Image (tube, helix red, strand yellow):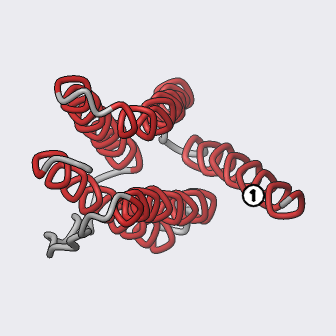
Amino acid sequence: MLSQAMIDRLNQQINLEMYSSHLYLQMSSWCAYKALEGCATFLSQHADEEMMHMRRLLNYLHETGSLAVISGMQAPPSNFSSLKELFEQIYEHEQCITRKINDLVHLGNTEQDYSTLQFLQWYVAEQHQEEFLFKGILDKIYLIGTEGQGIFFIDREIANLAATKGNEATAMTASA
């Protein structure tokens, strides 16, 4: 049985993951509006992934006999000064998510809640991958730049990431 403190923190994380999904969907919309189709597709996929993260937490609460509580959330920002700013915000957001996951792990350790600690290990690994991914995108943006044709090349690079992610998802579905 989970402590009330753990239930509350897991519920906060559920709502944070849902906000992440909305944030990336809004960012995808901004990219589509700016004719950055590769970025739009990639961020739309990422919004779906964040929703899956939320559902995984929701299911864990259900499995433990706890009540998942979906709360209201503020609307994500809808306008960005540049693609660089957008990806800088994503990287900062992912760092925030990592801190929240680490706080959950700390609570699990403090409470000696080993089942939840085991469950959270997937999120620890996932956040490492997320930060690595978005730091890599930012590094490419800094290297290539977004002036002139640079933005075209960045969008194409991110479209390749989206295609790779799409192919991985198709392969996982086919093998299931």
Residue 110's quadrant in the figure? top left
Residue at left 60%, top 45%? 149
Nearest the eye: 120 or 113:
113
Task: Return the x and y of residue 111 as percentages of the image width and height.
Answer: 18, 30
Direction from residue 129 to residue 1 in the image, left or right:
left
Q: Residue furthest front?
A: 1
Residue at left 51%, top 59%? 43
Residue placed under numbered mark 1 in the picture: 169
Crowd class of label 1 (few under 14; some 14 to 19; many from 20; radius 10 Å): few
Task: Return the x and y of residue 170 as percentages of the image width and height.
Answer: 82, 61
Residue at left 22%, top 59%? 11
Direction from residue 88 to residue 32 in the image, left or right:
right
Task: Return the x and y of residue 146 as percentages of the image width and height.
Answer: 48, 41
Residue at left 45%, top 56%? 53
| Amino acid under disc 1 | Ala
Q: In this view, does 112 lie above or below 35?
A: above
Can the viewer see residue 131? Answer: no
Direction from residue 141 to residue 87 in the image, left or right:
left
Residue 98's quadrant in the figure? top left
Direction from residue 84 to residue 15 in the image, left or right:
left
Q: In this view, does 7 lie above or below 139?
A: below
Can the viewer see residue 109? Answer: yes
Q: Which image quarter holds the C terminus?
A: bottom right
Total numbered circles: 1
SS class of the residue under badge 1? helix
Nearest the eye: 9 or 85:
9
Task: Return the x and y of residue 77 as percentages of the image width and height.
Answer: 22, 64
